[in-house]
Image (cartoon, rainbow, N blue to C red):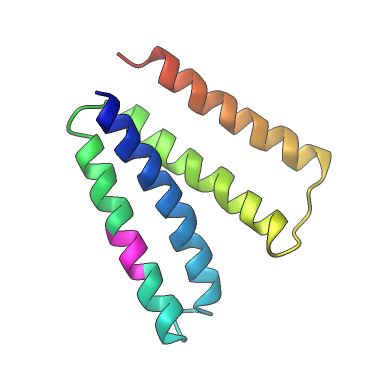
Amino acid sequence: MALAWIYLVVAGLLEVVWATGMKYSEGFSRFWPTAGTLVAMLASFGLLSISMKTLPLGTSYTVWTGIGAVGAVLVGILVFGESSSPARLLFIAMIITGIVGLKLTSP
C-alpha cells in the first residue's frame, strides 16, 4: 500500500513536470521540450495506473490532479512570475487540505 502512495506522489510530481514542459514547448513547436513533455506524460500516466491497482479510483485521480494543480500553480508563481495573491494562496491551501483529507480517509 505504501508503495502505491509513493507511485502516486511521483506521478503527481511528473504531472507538474509535463505541465511545465508543455509551457516551454510553445504549443508543441519546440522539439526537446515537446519530447520531454511526452516522456513525463507517459511516466506520469504509467505510475498513476500502477497506483490505481491498489488505491481507490477517486482518491488516486484526485490526489494526482491535486498535486499537479498545486505544483503547476507554484511553478507559475516561482518561475513565471504569476500572481501570488492571498486569494490564490488560500485556494492552493484548500486543495492541499483536500488532498490530505483524502489520504487520511482512504482505506
Q: Position of residue 70 (x, y in %)?
A: 58, 43
Q: What residue range appears in magenta?
A: 38-42
Relative placement, left or right, of 95 versus 88 is left
Quarter of the image holding residue 12?
Answer: top left
**Residue drawn 71% across the image and 55% down it:** 77
Residue at the extreme right of the image, as rendered: 86
Q: Quadrant of the N terminus?
A: top left
Vertical relation: 102 (above or below) 4: above
Relative placement, left or right, of 77 versus 59 is right
**Residue drawn 17% across the image and 33% down it:** 53
Is residue 34 highlighted in magenta?
no
Q: Total number of numbered labels?
A: 0
Q: Position of residue 16 (x, y in %)?
A: 49, 54
Vertical relation: 88 (above or below) 103: below
Q: Quadrant of the C terminus?
A: top left
**Residue drawn 74% across the image and 38% down it:** 89
What is the magenta segment's predominant secondary structure?
Answer: helix
Relative placement, left or right, of 28 versus 42 is right
**Residue drawn 28% across the image and 60% down it:** 42
Vertical relation: 44 (above or below) 29: above
Q: Position of residue 59 (x, y in %)?
A: 36, 28
